[in-house]
Amino acid sequence: MSSEFPLVQTPLKRDSKSTYNQGQYGLWEPGLSFALPGDLLVSYASRGGWYSLDGGMAILGFNIVTSAFNYTTSSGALQIGPIPFIPHTGQTFGYPGVIVWSGIVLPAGYTQLASYISSGFEYILLMMSGSGQPINSVGNAEVATGSSLILDGSVLYRVNKL
């Protein structure tokens, strides 16, 4: 590892009074949940994440592999988080990223997934798209109970600056 990029083990503070320093690098631990977690039980084979914060922009990388993903009462959008830095809140658009994945069953007509952070939210969504289809978030209907998931991606976004 290069000494130019030392890792910091703890993310910056996440409250609204925090400021950031340029050139911050570190690790974060991503987790999976649904918008309404209910009785969700996730066992991770492995998970990890890294971040870089510089010039008002953050880039997050994540890798999650589950060995078990079980629920009966959970519902809503699948979420990865909590992310270490809150996205800029003065915008009406979000930030799409990239992801390679396994274990999600897309509905007919949907062919692609993207990681996605919305302005002011504390988690990453997975958005599905396809030709002639509305863009929708991946939810419990696309992730069957008992699934094993592999999610490996990144997203670049603007953070609040005080």
Image (cartoon, grey):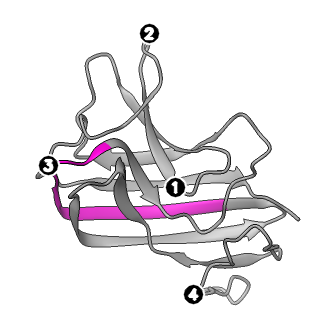
The residue pinned by badge 2 equals 132
Q: Quadrant of residue 139?
A: top left
Q: How many marks?
A: 4
Mark 2 to mark 4 CA distance (whole Å): 44 Å
Residue 91 percent coordinates (x, y):
77, 39
Q: Secondary structure at mark 2?
A: loop
Q: CA distance from mark 1 to mark 3?
A: 22 Å
Asked if the residue under mark 3 is in contact with the one under mark 2, i.e. CB atoms within 8 Å, the reply is no
- Mark 1 and mark 3 lie on one chain; the one further toward the N terminus is 3
Residue at image coords 62%, 85%? 7
Q: How many C-alpha atoms fall within 10 Å of the one at disc 4: few (<14), some, or many (≥20)? A: few
> Are dots 2 and 1 in contact, CB under 8 Å?
no
Residue plotted at (23% across, 42% down): 143
Residue 72 is tagged as 3
Query: In terms of sequence position, does the residue under pointer 1 or pointer 4 come before the other?
Result: 4
Q: Point out residue 64 in the picture as x, y percentages from the top left corner.
A: 34, 63
The segment highlighted magenta reads 59-75
* Mark identifier at residue 77: none
Between discs 2 and 3, the one toward the N terminus: 3
Measured along the vertical axis of the image, is residue 97 above or below residue 10? above
Q: Is residue 44 left or right of residue 95?
A: left
Q: Quadrant of residue 47?
A: bottom left
- Residue to which mark 4 is pinned: 9
Cα distance in 3D space between marks 3 and 4:
35 Å
User: Would you say the residues marked 1 and 4 are in contact, meaning their CB atoms lie under 8 Å apart?
Assistant: no
Neighbour class for label 1 at 10 Å: few (<14), some, many (≥20)?
many
Q: Amino acid at mark 1?
A: Tyr
Front disc: 1 or 4? 1
Rendering coords of residue 75 (x, y %): 29, 43
Which residue matches tag 1? 123
